């Protein structure tokens, strides 16, 4: 049966000898009857919330979020735990002290509208709703709103930036020009020489580096397929040699020490991986863009062309260049050399079908460009006279 208390309807039913008394979070009697029927169906299907689940659902959102993160901590990676904490921040601000039990589809839709107005991407918003979904599933109440919550469209056509040979040379010359960018420079060389992701490099330990056999072994990656052995070319070897010299100076050469140790105010912790080199990376990319623009502007001025337009066009490839784009740079260059799909996947770890189709297209474009260079106007030669027919000969 349903009953009203405090302006809201509640359900009180007994199924298989077990009594269930729950709030239906509605003031409309007709909706309450529908929710009662749905709830009984969930109970019969074995989806009834446990006592702990009901208690979790009644907590103010901020408290429920704290408990959710604490319960998740032993079961997820530190990076995932941090990400979920960050995703919950705007949800905490919006939902305030509202309990999970009172969160309705209308509230979630209002949250989505508010977040869209800030200009965030559909992917980020979907990830935020994904964490809320996990919390509501933990409370066994997601089924109440699931049908009325819709994901935002995600932009799946984002193409990573790939630099030309001259642009790549300029980027790394810029990185080498400032000693303060040394770590970011070495990391960038390794990424573009091995296909490694940033997270893979940050969790690289000296025990995973074999300078004699010229290999590194990726033990921590985004996916299980990302665990792999990668041979080192000359550039990668030089970068690791530079990092080894640095490790000897700071006392970070033991097998379990990280190649990129954490550093806080010049205090190194070799047992903790570096969290980010974002500041240095952004600075050197900005400087590369400035150099490219200035050089183009100089040439444009000499040629009597639009200086500002030339500056903007030459700097554009560096604007928004992500560290992760270096991985795509490496894979693209491998594809352009004609490397097989199997070789690319073995070196880069898992690549989904869409990405492999993209690199297959790159490889075909490279082949086409090579063959186009063979063109020499052969069909423009003088036409060959047809051989006389047998009738004319006779």
Image (cartoon, rainbow, N blue to C red):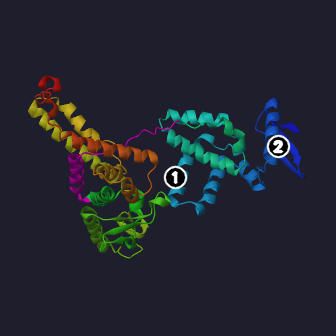
Judge whether 34 appears above or below 366 on screen.
above
Magenta stretch holds residue 160: yes
Q: Which mark is residue 40?
A: 2
Q: Residue furthest right?
A: 17
> In the picture provided, is 53 more to the left or to the right than 95?
right
Residue 153 position in % (x across, y down)? 52, 36
- Among numbered discs 1 and 2, the one appearing first in the sequence: 2
Which label is found at residue 83?
A: 1
Camera-nearest residue between 81 and 239: 239
Instruction: Locate residue 290 relative to residue 142 in the image: left or right.
Output: left
Mark in the foreground, 1 or 2: 2
| Residue at 25% in and 40% down | 315
Q: Residue furthest front?
A: 394
- State whether residue 172 is above or below residue 371: below
Residue at the outermost left position: 302
Magenta range is: 153-179
Q: How many marks overall?
A: 2
Residue found 58% across the figure and 38% down from its top: 151
Q: Quadrant of the N terminus?
A: top right
Name the residue nearer the viewer: 194 or 198: 194
Please determine whether, in this image, residue 109 is positioned above or below residue 201. above
Can residue 7 be seen here? The reply is no
């Amino acid at each position: 049966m349903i009953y009203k208390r405090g302006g809201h309807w509640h359900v009180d039913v007994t199924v298989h000898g077990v009594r269930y008394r729950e709030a239906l979070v509605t003031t409309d009697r007709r909706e309450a009857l529908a929710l009662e029927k749905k709830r009984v169906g969930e109970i019969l299907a074995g989806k009834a919330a446990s006592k702990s689940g009901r208690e979790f659902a009644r907590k103010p959102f901020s408290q429920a979020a704290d408990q959710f993160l604490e319960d998740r901590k032993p079961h997820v990676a530190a990076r995932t735990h941090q990400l979920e904490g960050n995703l919950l921040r705007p949800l905490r601000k919006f939902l305030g002290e509202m309990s999970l039990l009172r969160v309705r589809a209308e509230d979630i839709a209002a949250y989505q509208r508010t977040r869209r107005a800030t200009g965030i991407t559909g992917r980020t918003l979907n990830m935020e709703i994904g964490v809320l979904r996990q919390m509501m599933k933990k409370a066994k109440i997601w089924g109440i709103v699931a049908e009325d919550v819709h994901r935002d469209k995600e932009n799946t056509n984002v193409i990573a930036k790939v630099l030309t040979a001259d642009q790549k040379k300029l980027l790394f010359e810029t990185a080498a020009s400032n000693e303060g960018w040394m770590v970011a420079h070495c990391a960038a060389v390794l990424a573009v020489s091995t296909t490694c992701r940033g997270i893979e490099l940050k969790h690289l330990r000296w025990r995973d580096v074999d300078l004699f056999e010229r290999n590194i072994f990726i033990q921590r990656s985004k996916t299980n397929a990302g665990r792999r052995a990668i041979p080192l070319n000359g550039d990668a070897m030089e970068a690791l040699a530079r990092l080894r010299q640095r490790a000897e100076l700071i006392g970070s050469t033991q097998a379990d020490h990280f190649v990129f140790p954490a550093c806080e105010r010049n205090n190194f912790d070799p047992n903790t991986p570096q969290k980010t080199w974002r500041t240095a990376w952004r600075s050197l990319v900005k400087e590369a863009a400035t150099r490219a623009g200035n050089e183009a502007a100089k040439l444009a001025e000499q040629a009597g062309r639009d200086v500002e337009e030339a500056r903007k066009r030459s700097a554009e490839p560096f604007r928004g260049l992500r560290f992760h784009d270096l991985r795509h740079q490496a894979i693209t260059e491998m594809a352009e050399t004609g490397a097989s799909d199997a070789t690319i996947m073995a070196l880069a770890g898992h690549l989904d079908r869409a990405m492999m189709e993209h690199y297959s297209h790159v490889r075909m474009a490279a082949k086409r460009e090579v063959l186009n260079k063979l063109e020499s106007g052969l069909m423009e030669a003088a036409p060959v006279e047809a051989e006389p027919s047998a009738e004319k000969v006779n």
